[in-house]
Image (cartoon, rainbow, N blue to C red):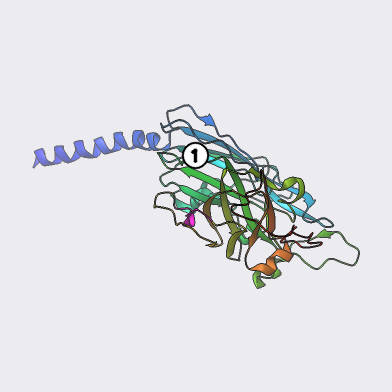
Amino acid sequence: MRRYVLIALIGVMAVMLGLPAALAKSKSKPAPSPEDAVLTFAPAVPPPIARRQPAVVRVRLDAGMKRASISSDLTYTFWTFNDHVPGPFIRAREGDTLEVHLTNSDGSGMPHNVDLHAVTGPGGGATVTTVTQGEERVAWFKLLHPGLFVYHCAAPPVMDHIANGMYGLILVEPKAGLPPVDREFYVLQSEFYAKEPAEGATHLEFSHEQGALEHPRFVVFNGQVGALMGEGALTAKTGERVRIYFGNVGPNLISSFHVIGEVFDRVYREADLISPPARSIQTTLVPAGGATVVEFGVEVPGTYTLVDHAIFRVEKGGVGFLQVDGKPRHDIYLSQDDAPTCAGCLVHP
């Protein structure tokens, strides 16, 4: 009997002695020295990752507020990551560990956090990153799954933080990387819900009620009406291959993403970067909180139009342009007469 009691006591002591060490190990910072992520703002994308070994990738995000133009004649108070809507594009690799530093410079006193759809674990990281003004939280997340993912603030009420601009995209490249292309672009669709302004007012206020009714005043690409027009238009040259990392943060509507005048050669549906891509797709559905990756070659010069093909949304801002320069290709596209100017047309400028 004494022998069995002694064995049991030794086992208990071993567990008690080992448990603190195990806990300390589980809470310890990963061993490799972190490298700072290259962060870019829409429509720019960080360069492809050349290394093939996993790394600790440090990302610094700051939650704040910013009053800025949402259209040519109206302003809005955006809730932001790193002072932009959408927030920065994050590029990492399958097997990397994401080291997230989240700070809060929002003077309103609201708490904020970040839910990364690429993260495996409670809240996508939101539960351990909540910060109030002046605070910083640091957390580490192993990136187990390749793909293109949305991230957003998930502090309550979650829908208000998303609807006001706190979101972005994170790309987790497969271990083998992605096929090279000539141009990569970051495009994120979202909706804004606002109260009807007083006569003569030029500043819009957020409306939770309109959000609940799913009646957006604006449906836009990259945070504002006209972000992909004029000097903001995407650009390419004939003979190049274009890849668009396209996300739809919602918070309510499904996007029917289409580029007028092009056919997608490859569509990584729902941003699945492992399965063979779909071919020759005209329009692809992107749910709220989802993403896709599309590729196509540009053979003919001219202006191509990005739209949500729920086409009335064009009048709410869901439109942008890709300007392609190069020599004419009369073997592909030829007409008897030149195209007339389409005055006031948002789809065919």
Q: Is residue 138 visible?
A: yes
Whole-percent x, y for residue 174 in the image: 42, 42
Q: Nearer the viewer, residue 50 or 66?
A: 50
Rendering quarter of residue 345: bottom right
Above-or-below relation of 73 to 233: below
**Residue furthest front in the image:** 336
Could you tell me which residue is drawn at 64 percent across and 43 percent down? Answer: 236
Estimate the x, y position of residue 263 in percent, counting from the top left.
Answer: 55, 57
Q: Taking the image as drawn, is residue 286 in sight?
A: no
Q: Position of residue 183 (x, y in %)?
A: 58, 41
Q: How many marks?
A: 1
Return the x and y of residue 276 as percentages of the image width and height: 40, 52
Is 287 located above or below residue 141 in the figure?
below
Q: Which residue is mark 1?
A: 180
Tell me the quadrant of the picture where the N terminus can be found. Answer: top left
Q: What segment is highlighted magenta in the picture?
A: 264-272
Element on which disc 1 rests: loop
Crowd rating for badge 1 (residues with CA inside 10 Å; few <14, some 14–19, many 20+): few
